[in-house]
C-alpha cells in the first residue's frame, strides 16, 4: 500500500477550555499505512478549541522514532497543572518506552498492526514551569504561578497498540477505482503501570486519501484510572471522555484535534512527521541555500537561521556538506525557579556547519555538527510582584556549538527544487564573560552557559 500525504486543517472552533491528552508513553495516532521514521508532536491548549484556561495536561511534547524495521522508541514530556483553590499545584510527567511490532499484515485492501512495548513513567519536576511560562511570554499569555506537588515517583509500564485499516472498494462508472481512496480505521491502545495506573483509548475513524492528501474523521473514547494525587487524578478525569476526532496531513505537517462531548473540552496537536524516506536512494543535488526554523527547550527561545553551501574547509570529493550558518535567537525564558523574573534574550551568531548522510547511499537521515561565535544581549523583566521592574541590558560575545539529526520528510522529495526535513538536536552557548543584572535592589547573575534541545524544520533550496 502506497504512502499517502495529508493536508493541513485550517480552522479550529472556539470554546472556554482546552487540554491535551495523549497517553504518555505511546506513539500518537496516524493512519497505519504510513511508515513513520520520526514524529515530533507538540500539544498545547491553543491548539484545541482555544481559550485562556491553563489546566490539566496543558502542554505535551512527544518524540517517536523508528529504530529498525520492528523496533520503535517514544519519549514524552507532559506538563500538568491544576488551579483549583482546593488543591492548586503542578507536576510534570516524563515517559520513555520501547515498542516492538509483533504483527504486520498487509494486502490490497488494508493493513493490520499490533505493537507491544514497555518503559518507564516518572512524575515530579522536569522543567515544566520554565517551559510553560517561557511559551506564555512569547505569546503574551498569563504567567502560571503554581507550586509543584511534594510527591514524585517512577513506575514501570507495559502497553499494546493495535490498528486495523480496510479500504472501501468504490469504483467509478468505468469500473476503475476513483481518485479518492476511502476506508475505515480502528485503533485500540492500553497502558498499565506498576503504580496501578491504567490508561485506555479506542478510536473509530473514516479515512479519505489520495496521492497528496489524508483526512480522517471519527470518534475516540478514553478511560483513565488508578491516579492518587489530586493534580494527576483531576487530569485523568478530564481526559476520561468521548470526543470527535478531526485530523489531516500535508507533507511533513499533521494537525489533529479531539473535541470532547461531555467535559466540554478539547485538545489539539501539531506534528512534524518524516515518513517513507528510509529506503529512498540518495541523489546528487545542488542545494546552496537553506532556512532553519525551530525552538530551543527548556529555555524557550525561537531560532531562525539561514545557510549557504560553501567549500571553506571541505573538498569537492568529501561526503560532508559544508555550510555557513547565520542564526538569530529570541525569547524571554524564566530565570531559573524565579517565576516572576524573565530574561529577554537576543542573539546573533555565525557558525560553520558540517553534515553528512548517516547511511551510505540513503537520504532519509543525516547527522550535523556546527561551531561558531556570536553576540548575546540579556535584560531582566519583572512580572507579578515585580511588575514594571526591569534591569539594564548587557551583551557578551559567545561561542556556540550544535549537533543533531535531520530526517527527510515525504511530500518534498529529492529531485525537486526544495527539500523539507525535521530536525532534532542540541545547542550549547558559552559566553566569554559573565555579568550581573540588578532588579529591585537584588543582583542576579546573567550571561551563564546554556544547553538546550533543538526542535524544528529545515528547508533546502536549489
Image (cartoon, helix red, strand yellow):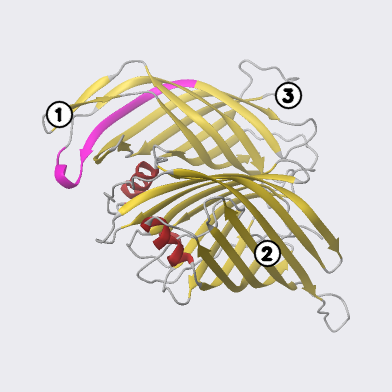
Residue that mark 2 sits on: 213
Q: Where residue 29 sits in the image (x, y, percent)?
A: 63, 60
**What is the number of the mark on residue 319?**
3
Q: Which residues are magenta?
A: 372-389
Residues 231 and 18: in front is: 231
Q: Where residue 184 sits in the image (x, y, percent)?
A: 72, 73
Residue that mark 1 sits on: 442
Point 39% across, 37% down: residue: 299
Asked whether, in this view, residue 445 is left or right of residue 212, the answer is left
Is 155 within the magenta?
A: no
Closer to the N terminus: mark 1 or mark 3?
3
SS type, badge 3: loop
SS type, badge 2: strand
In space, the residues marked 1 and 3 are separated at their CA atoms by 53 Å
Is label 2 in contact with label 3 (beta carbons under 8 Å)? Answer: no
Q: Quadrant of the N terminus?
A: bottom right
Residues 73 and 266: in front is: 73
Q: Quadrant of the C terminus?
A: top right
Closer to the N terminus: mark 2 or mark 3?
2
In space, the residues marked 2 and 3 are separated at their CA atoms by 35 Å
Amino acid at each position: 500500500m502506497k504512502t499517502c500525504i495529508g493536508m493541513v486543517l485550517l480552522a479550529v472552533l472556539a470554546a472556554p477550555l482546552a487540554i491535551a491528552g495523549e497517553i504518555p508513553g505511546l506513539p500518537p495516532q496516524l493512519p497505519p499505512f504510513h511508515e513513520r521514521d520520526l514524529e515530533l508532536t507538540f500539544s498545547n491548549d491553543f491548539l484545541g478549541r482555544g481559550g485562556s484556561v491553563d489546566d490539566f495536561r496543558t502542554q505535551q511534547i512527544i518524540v517517536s522514532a523508528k529504530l529498525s524495521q520492528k523496533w520503535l522508541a517514544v519519549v514524552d514530556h507532559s506538563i500538568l497543572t491544576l488551579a483549583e483553590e482546593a488543591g492548586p499545584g503542578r507536576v510534570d510527567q516524563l515517559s520513555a518506552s520501547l515498542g516492538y511490532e509483533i504483527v504486520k499484515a498487509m494486502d490490497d485492501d488494508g493493513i493490520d498492526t499490533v505493537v507491544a512495548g514497555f518503559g518507564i513513567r516518572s512524575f515530579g519536576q522536569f522543567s515544566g514551569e520554565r517551559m510553560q511560562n517561557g511559551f506564555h511570554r512569547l505569546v503574551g499569555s498569563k504567567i502560571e504561578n503554581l507550586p509543584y506537588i511534594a510527591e514524585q515517583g517512577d513506575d514501570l509500564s507495559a502497553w499494546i497498540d493495535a490498528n486495523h485499516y480496510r479500504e472501501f472498494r468504490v469504483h467509478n462508472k468505468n469500473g476503475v477505482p476513483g481518485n479518492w481512496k476511502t476506508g475505515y480505521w480502528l485503533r485500540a491502545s492500553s497502558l498499565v503501570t506498576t503504580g496501578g495506573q491504567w490508561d485506555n483509548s479506542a478510536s473509530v475513524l473514516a479515512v479519505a486519501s489520495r496521492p497528496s492528501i489524508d483526512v480522517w474523521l471519527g470518534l475516540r473514547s478514553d478511560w483513565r484510572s488508578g491516579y492518587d494525587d489530586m493534580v494527576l487524578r483531576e487530569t485523568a478525569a478530564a481526559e476520561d471522555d468521548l470526543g470527535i476526532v478531526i485530523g489531516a496531513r500535508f507533507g511533513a505537517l499533521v494537525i489533529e484535534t479531539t473535541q470532547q462531548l461531555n467535559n466540554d473540552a478539547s485538545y489539539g496537536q501539531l506534528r512534524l512527521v518524516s515518513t517513507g524516506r528510509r529506503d529512498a536512494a540518495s541523489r546528487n543535488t545542488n542545494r546552496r541555500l537553506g532556512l532553519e526554523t525551530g525552538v530551543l527547550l527548556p529555555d524557550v527561545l525561537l531560532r531562525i537561521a539561514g545557510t549557504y553551501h560553501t567549500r571553506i574547509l571541505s573538498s569537492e570529493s568529501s561526503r560532508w556538506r559544508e555550510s555557513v550558518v547565520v542564526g538569530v535567537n529570541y525569547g524571554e525564558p524564566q530565570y531559573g525557579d524565579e517565576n516572576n523574573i524573565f530574561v529577554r534574550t537576543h542573539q546573533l551568531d555565525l557558525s560553520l556547519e558540517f553534515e553528512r548522510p548517516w547511511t551510505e547511499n540513503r537520504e532519509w537521515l543525516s547527522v550535523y555538527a556546527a561551531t561558531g561565535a556570536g553576540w548575546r544581549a540579556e535584560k531582566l523583566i519583572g512580572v507579578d510582584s515585580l511588575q514594571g521592574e526591569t534591569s539594564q541590558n548587557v551583551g557578551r560575545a559567545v561561542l556556540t556549538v550544535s549537533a543533531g539529526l535531520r530526517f527527510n520528510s515525504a511530500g518534498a522529495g529529492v529531485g525537486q527544487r526544495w527539500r523539507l526535513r525535521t530536525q532534532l538536536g542540541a545547542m550549547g552557548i558559552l559566553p566569554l564573560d559573565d555579568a550581573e543584572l540588578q532588579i529591585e535592589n537584588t543582583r542576579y547573575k546573567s550571561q551563564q552557559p546554556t544547553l538546550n534541545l533543538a526542535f524544528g524544520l529545515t528547508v533546502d533550496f536549489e
